[in-house]
Amino acid sequence: MITVHRLCRFVLPALLLAGCCLHAQTTAERMAWFQHDKLGMFIHFGPYSALAGEWKGHQTPVGDEAEWIMQRFNIPVAEYREMAHRFNPSRFDAEQCVALAKAAGMKYLVVTAKHHDGFAMYQSKVSRYNIVDWTPLKRDIVKELADACKKAGIRFCVYYSHREDWDDPDGYGNNWDYDRAKKNFAKYLEGKSKPQMRELLTNYGPLGLVWFDRGLDTPAHAQEFVDMVRKLQPQCLINGRVGNYGRELMGDYQDMNDNGMPTGGLEEYWETPQTLNTTWGYSKFDQQWKSAGNVIQRLVEIVSKGGNYLLNIGPMGDGSIPAPSVATLRKVGEWMAKNSASIYGSSACPLPDSPWGRCTVNGSTVYLHVFAWPSDAILRVPGLKTEVRSAHLLVDPAHQLKVTREHGVTSIGLPARMPDDTDAVVVLQLAGALQVEREMVTQGSDAPLSLDYLKGATSGKAVKRFNRDGKFHISKWTGTADSISWRMLVSQAGKYRVRIRYSAPSEWAGGKYEIHVGSELVNGTVQTTGEGYQYRVFDLGTISLRAGEHAVVIRPTAELSHYLMYFESIVLDPVF
Ligand code: JFZ
């Protein structure tokens, strides 16, 4: 008989628990940690680390990826397997690795569970070609890192090369041992790729995210991996390289090209994977190490544009971490120890990039990251509309800095000496949420007016996006409430030819849109530009413009069952 006592003690809490588990997390809820944490450690580690960029006297050129050595020198599977048999990184210390990540201010860690060479860095029942069954080390590196991350409060994540597998006869990429025409890629997906992914999602505890790479042959196959992750670990995030680069984003967030630094303004979650030198896997030839200062400024640049920074280390063949990597990450950690309030939980800053540095925002607090100290120790911030309540150095909150505003420029009086030679952070406490002067599109003499991705402001469902094939564009708009607008200053009155550049697959042809340029109206009908992201320019005729400021807006004129177009830009060319 269920007593009141039993009801309160057991049944209710169970129901509550079930309720919260059953409640499907929204993307925003699942992405919250990712958006807060900003900085992660990437680890490229495998048998290629022991080769260190060299095979039988042939060197991987500095600048190229040493983890691609098997493909670069078409190393036969039998020989690569033989080399992997001797792979013995006994000096690898998971706790030391995680401690280094933590010291650098990194909050998540992504390790290559299997890279393109097909070798598993964990004990896989699917293939004996793994670190436990194939090498003298007989240790499960992925397990050791998962445990160390759990202990240190670092979010554990895995990288899995779901398409490329140069060891598997049916995998993608090895056309030197195996005849491409005879490959049965689906057999590799069903026989190795998917079962190994299931092992990783089942045997290593909760994963923060799965980092797939280089896309997949079809959206349907990519969706099978998405469905598997969603089913086995609903909270686990999926990066944008699960699907084909030339198609709609299938994961939770977009990945830039390697070492890619976006020009700005992305309005969806994104991350950029970057190296500390020029290779992911260890190369004894590559000493082109980035300085700690450069790494810190890259972090700020990325966070100031709303992204995450996944910074790589490539352990050596014995498992130890290259000293330059350790030194750089330690220095990053020293800066983060004093300045992480300006990074964690912050969002992209709408203020235009300044010659002196970048800015990040958190609510009504703005962090000005000064990379170059103004010679007159006066920091000028154009475009800030919100009143500044107070200003101080992040490292010296006791000393208020003098703030003045004139002609729309806010000036902050700084100490004569720069308190940090990489990035000195000035904190502005605003009287409310940050409001910024919209950037004005201007024209040179007889020059066109370019209304592009960067200076446009989106509204409704219109979103500024990136993918490798589509580059920077605006899409996801389907109806009259979705638009892009600009402030434009015409300095030469007269006739202008209106041209629009976009991409649209055949099924989007016929979509109607309108462009208001001041009091002028231009109507357009979407034409297909071909599959994938093929951009074309379309001439929409001429309009007459008076000199002065004009508001420009483009929007669909009806509700659509698909996106209007992948928009890139409108150009107004003077016709004098
Ligand atoms: C891939 C891998 O091939 C490489 O070994 C490493 O793991 C890296 C993180 O990812 O390399 C890529 C993938 C995508 C692009 C460039 C390199 N890209 O989209 O430009």
Image (spheres, rainbow, N blue to C red):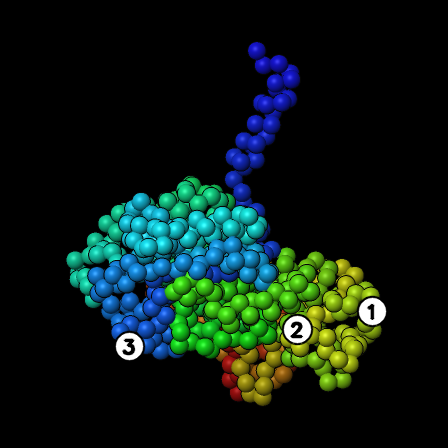
User: Residue 427's spot in the image, x, y percent?
Assistant: 74, 66
Mark 1 or mark 3, earlier in chain: 3
Callout 2–callout 1 Cβ contact below 8 Å? no
Mark 2 or mark 1, earlier in chain: 1
Q: What is the secondary structure assignment of the residue under circle 3?
A: loop
Front residue (pair 525, 117): 117
Name which residue type carries label 2.
Asp
Which mark's residue is nearer the viewer, 2 or 3? 3
Disc 3 under 8 Å from ligand 1? The reply is no
Name which residue type carries label 1.
His
Front residue (pair 278, 30): 278
Q: What is the secondary structure assignment of the residue under circle 2?
A: loop
CA gap between label 1 and label 3 equals 60 Å
Q: Is residue 8 visible?
A: yes
Q: What is the secondary structure assignment of the residue under circle 1?
A: strand
Q: Give neighbour class at mark 3: few <14, some 14-19, many 20+ (Cα, 10 Å).
A: few
* Residue underneath mark 3: 57
CA gap between label 2 and label 1 equals 18 Å
As drawn, the label of residue 399 is: 1
Mark 2 or mark 3, earlier in chain: 3
Residue depicted at 40% across the width and 47% down the height? 200
As drawn, the label of residue 423 is: 2
Name which residue type carries label 3.
Gly
